[in-house]
Amino acid sequence: MSVKLEYSTLAACSPEAVWKLFSQTDLWAQWTTFIQGARWISGEPWQQGSEMELTVTQPPLKLKGKLVEAKPPFVFRIDGGAMGMTVQHEFAFVEQADKTLMATRMTLSGPATVFINDGIKDRAVKGFAQWFDRLKTEVESGQKAV
């Protein structure tokens, strides 16, 4: 069994502008209450094979993942897991006319997914929305020209 959680929004800027801000992982905790911190723990940041540690607030735990796909400023996917769950988290920043589609999809699989109810799914998607909407606001406010 697997669970997919998705969120997307449009930003009035280029994928490069979104990536420039998004790639500053030390800022992630400012954009959503679900992330306490993010840091690279091995390898070079944003290089395939590098490892990241993400500290989340609900439930309180540290997730470790390996960067399996990186095509800045457009795509990034990290695979990891914790507590009986495998996690694939994908981010895409796709140019669309004068805007960028900012999209994320998290796929959870493993025996612990039976504990993921609709309330947990809703909170997770709201966390993605908070993260992307705050990132969008910040990147758009810093734009001089699209």
Image (spheres, rainbow, N blue to C red):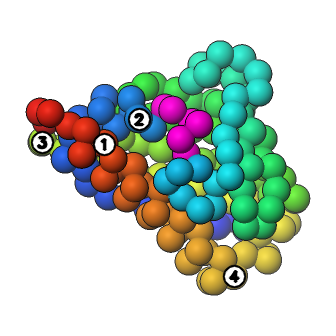
Give the CA separation, mark 3 to mark 2: 20 Å
Give the CA separation, mark 4 to mark 2: 32 Å
| Helix, strand or loop at mark 4 | loop
Residue tagged by mark 4? 117
Residue tagged by mark 3? 97
Q: Residues within 10 Å of mark 1 (few under 14, many from 20)?
A: many
For marks 3 and 4 on the same chain, the one whose residue lies earlier in the sequence: 3
For marks 2 and 1 on the same chain, the one whose residue lies earlier in the sequence: 2
Residue tagged by mark 1? 139
For marks 4 and 2 on the same chain, the one whose residue lies earlier in the sequence: 2
Residue tagged by mark 2? 21
Q: Amino acid at mark 4?
A: Asn
In front of the other: 36 or 120: 36
In front of the other: 64 or 56: 56
Residue 18 horizontal side relative to residue 114, left or right: left
Quadrant housing residue 123 = bottom right
For marks 3 and 2 on the same chain, the one whose residue lies earlier in the sequence: 2
User: Of tags 4 and 1, which is closer to the observer?
Assistant: 1
User: Of tags 4 and 2, which is closer to the observer?
Assistant: 2
Give the CA separation, mark 3 to mark 4: 37 Å
In front of the other: 45 or 117: 45
Assess whether mark 3 and mark 1 are in contact (beta carbons under 8 angstroms): no
Residue 82 horizontal side relative to residue 52, left or right: right
Give the CA separation, mark 2 to mark 1: 7 Å
Q: Residues within 10 Å of mark 2 (few under 14, many from 20)?
A: some
Q: Amino acid at mark 2?
A: Leu
User: Of tags 1 and 3, which is closer to the observer?
Assistant: 1
Assess whether mark 1 and mark 2 are in contact (beta carbons under 8 angstroms): yes
